[in-house]
Amino acid sequence: MKKIISLVGARPNFIKIAPLHKIFKTFSKEITHKICHTGQHFDENMSKIFFDELDLPKPDFYLGIGGGTHTEQTARIMIEFEKVLLQENPDLIIVPGDVNSTLAGALTASKMGIKIAHVESGLRSFDRSMPEEINRTVTDILADYLFVSEKSGIDNLSREGINSKKVFFVGNIMIDSLVHYLPAINASLITKDLELLIKNYILVTFHRPNNVDNLKSLKDIVNLLNNISLEKKVVFPIHPRTKGNLEKFGLLKQFAKNVLLTDPLGYVDFLALAKDAELVITDSGGIQEETTFMGIQCITVRNNTERPVTVDIGTNHLIGTDLNHVKDTAFKILKGAKKKGSIPELWDGKTAFRVIEILIDKPITF
Ligand code: UDP
């Protein structure tokens, strides 16, 4: 009997662990899978709703580490997670993605000689000013199993001198969740509830510190959305970090009437909105992938992406942070300059099977 603990902390982590948990349940005679939630995201609509919608059980361990600086958060997660590992003595931990919980989990387990699997390994923006880049790079150095979602990851890890025997190209686990919940996504009533016309609105998310932590760029974003909304309805589910800063800078009331502000949405409703949007504008990591899978035009307001396949063969337009350029590109897309994308290799809804096959070292029939 093997014992595995998955460490999750933030919204995208829950989406990446859910497909693995579903399969682990079917191997419950051979594997005990436990979930440890660090508490990095703790709001009802950033955490609990995902556990409910993605059929995840209540976490076996809850560390209650929310807030603080990156260092405080990472250090406090390490201290608390060490206690869990000492008590449980697992054979392996799984850390998904690139958040502080990912790094803290990998550091703690490696110091204790416990094996580490990193799901969504090898992605690189080559921009060390992003906390996520530090988290994913260090996690990859420490991991024993590196599960890669797109081929660029294999090249990145090879360039960094990581032994190719530890690297497995398994596809994109976020797409497993998307495929699994597609019937629920198709049945969502969110466009009706928000009185939106299908393919006639723009969905927006912003939460990266570079874009939302300073007055100038946040003010520019408000102006951009107000400008675009003269042409098309804009729907903006606001991340708690962004909302806090909009409030702090007195900008929350500056949005035009045609910009519909909402709280962060649950997984099913958010993807339903993305699926039926004419265009998505975002600085998210995962949303670049989900839009590519669904063939939805996406403008990424960043200077780089760690997910280049979404630009090379998908529907992602990597535009940079000059918001005039973003506005021009948005209008061009609305006028018809759409990218015809295709779905990247192994983004097929079966990534979790491939991961678990490798972990248990025997084939699973699917
Ligand atoms: N998401 C959601 N509700 C929202 C906004 C995003 O469910 O209001 C989902 C989205 O579909 C994606 C994930 O959250 O799967 C991405 O999370 P986020 O953008 O916060 O993180 P990143 O991917 O940038 O790390």
Image (tube, rainbow, N blue to C red):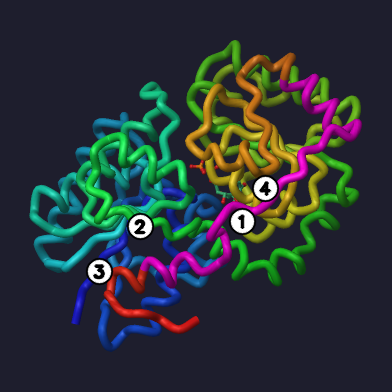
Mark whose residue sits in front, 1 or 2:
2
The residue at which mark 2 appears reads as 168
- Using the image, determine if residue 312 lies above or below residue 302: below
Residue placed at 37% from the left, 48% from the top? 121
> Label 2 crowding class (10 Å Cα cut-off): few <14, some 14-19, many 20+?
some
Q: CA distance from mark 2 to mark 4?
A: 24 Å
> Label 4 crowding class (10 Å Cα cut-off): few <14, some 14-19, many 20+?
many
Residue placed at 51% from the left, 54% from the top? 44
Q: CA distance from mark 3 to mark 1?
A: 27 Å
Mark whose residue sits in front, 4 or 3:
4
The residue at which mark 4 appears reads as 291
The three-letter code of the residue at mark 3 reads Ile
Mark whose residue sits in front, 3 or 2:
2
Highlighted range, magenta: 326-355
The residue at which mark 1 appears reads as 266
Q: CA distance from mark 4 to mark 3?
A: 32 Å
The residue at which mark 3 appears reads as 4
From the viewer's perspective, tell me whether residue 26 is left or right of residue 15: left
